[in-house]
Amino acid sequence: MTIQKLVIRSMRKNIKMYYLYFFAMIFSISLYFIFSTLQNDPTIVHMAKTSMNFSTSFQVAGILLILITILFTVYATNIFIRRRSQEIGLYQLIGLSKAWVARVLILEHTILGLGALLIGILVGALLSRLFLLVFLNLIGLEAMVGLTFSSQAVIQTIAVFTCLIAVTSVQIIVTVYRRTLIQLFQANHKNDYFSKRPSFVSGILGLAGLSLIGFGYYVSTLIVEHADLLMFLMLLVLASTIFGTYLVFHTTISWILYVFRKKQNGNLGLYNSLSVAPLMQRMKGHANSLTLITVLSAMTITMISLSYSLYYSTENDVRLAMPFDFAVENMQEEAAIISSSLEEEQIEFDYYQLDAIRFDGAWVEEDRNGNNRHRTFMLFSAEQMEQAGIDVESPPAGEAIYYNTRAIIEGMEIAFPKDVQYASNDEENRLTVSHFMLENVMNYRFYGEQLLVSEETFERMRDTIQDDEYKESLTFEVFHLLDTEKSDTASNIFLTNVDSDEYITDFYSAYEESRQTFGLLIFIAGLLGFVFILSTGSILYFKQMTEAEQEKKHYRTLRQLGFQVNDIMKGIIRKQLFVYLIPLGIGLIHAAFALNVGSVLIAASMLTPIIISMAAYIVIYLIFAAFTIQYYKGIVKGAL
């Protein structure tokens, strides 16, 4: 028999083993081809040249996509080589050289890879226009999109495919040459059975795993309050959570299952024997992979949820930071020109003048020995803000409300009440700030921390603050656009009539900039998230396929004893739900605490985006569980 015939026969025989692996390779290659096509699209190329964020984001995402694909392929190849170890041993046993065996396996993987490459490029070419339309819609750009085939994308995809084949070839050669015949014949029967009962130390380690995770969660809640120690605390949380998760899978769950079995006096019954017993035997062996899957799941859910939340709340967040569509400071002439230009274009708007005071002061700390934090403040009247259409609370006389959308991000202490001290002409030189609002009363581009007081307090402080370099009277001209359909035209009018050196912007421009940034973020996060989900789900599926083959003889025995397929499947379903839901559940909890820290970036509610992201992830994961259960059912049915 020639090598070619042997390879074709082998692939046909192992088709059940290869189909998901083949699909995963096609999916990965398709995504990378789509990504490369987008990278080389003229619209995206122009945006990358004008924005460093676009260029850097696509480069980083491309590298991550390649690394994820390579790691997944290496892991999957390792599982398949292990499953075919007896076949490799038989080849060597009948006198075939290791070089011949390695050549056959490499040729087999190359043929499989070439098929995945061709189908992947074809699928990617058909879907690239759809992905480009989705991307342009996310960032709010309107452009003519044609069906293009990028030769540069083909070259990049072939280069990545060549790297995959090279890596897997080296992996196959190393495996074939390093393993002895005994290791090859025993590789598929290697399990982590308990050699003894869990000891007192196991119980301590089990509790330590839960304690480390709890400690990581607790420290994560302190990150917001100690932003100056951000990197140290994040590393501490990661180390504690990852090591704690490893101990949970390695020791804690095994110990809990042992306690459960002990309470049953060893009488587990059929269903528990098919679910609890295999888990007890293999949990330590699964600790590394389940920890990796849990951490990757948490990272994926966090990445997708956070990026979706940022995109979902873009308009609301920008509006909280910029309550007026246009605002200029002490620029009466420019405001008059803008007003007349808007009227010429028949754009309806409301116009108001607001008085303000900019002065130097200091936050007075409760610790009298500490240094007061000197700041520049802007003082506004609540009554004037209400007249300008801003929904604000009017504070009592002698008190103020502090407005700042970035206070938490900047690590400011937001415990109130506290005082602001300023240079005064009379004995009253302090203003009590009663509470804090995570929004602005004036567009964020203007210098000074924003304080809102009553009209009475505003007039009193205007007279009492020392009239020197500490004080500046301001007049803000502000605009509310009523005709939002012409926001782009109005924005051009505003930006044309203000000095670009002043770095003044308007609501529409800030919104479009944020929309493009977060649209790019959610697109890349979604792309990488799909690859993460595919990789982690496939890894679990491949491992369960291996276990199903190893346990086939047990199912044959049960069928010979008269047990029906449905009876056996009930125990198997319990096991699969445990295998899939435990890492998924722990990953969701990890992600929830990570998102709690990430919530400081977003003023609006994150609940809806998080629920949608987590629900989508759970559904995709359960699809993999359903495939696994179906595969087991086929094994049980074919056991006799």
Image (cartoon, grey):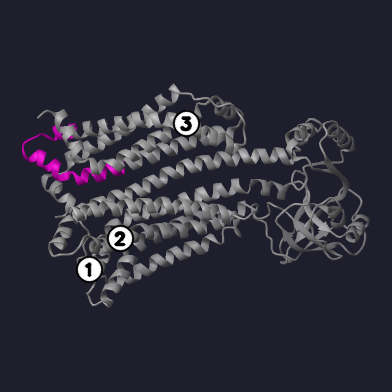
**Left or right relative to 588: residue 141:** right
Q: Which residues are magenta?
A: 74-103
Q: In front here: 452 or 427? A: 452
Q: Spatial distance from mark 2 to mark 1, Cα to Cα? A: 13 Å
**Left or right relative to 450: residue 535:** left
Give the percent coordinates (x, y) of residue 18.
Answer: 26, 41
Q: Is residue 36 magenta?
A: no
Contact? badges 3 and 2 (CB < 8 Å):
no
Q: Which residue is mark 1?
A: 270
Residue 476 visible to an observer of this rendering: no
Q: Residue at x 29, y 43 (%)?
A: 76
Under tag 3, what secondary structure?
helix
Image height of 296 relative to 4, above or below = below
* Amino acid at circle 1: Leu
Kindly give the residue lying farthest to the left in the view shown. Answer: 94
Q: Spatial distance from mark 3 to mark 2, Cα to Cα? A: 38 Å
Residue 128 disc label: 3
The quadrant of the picture occupied by the C terminus is: bottom left
Q: Earlier in the sequence, mark 3 or mark 1?
A: 3
Q: Spatial distance from mark 3 to mark 1, Cα to Cα? A: 50 Å
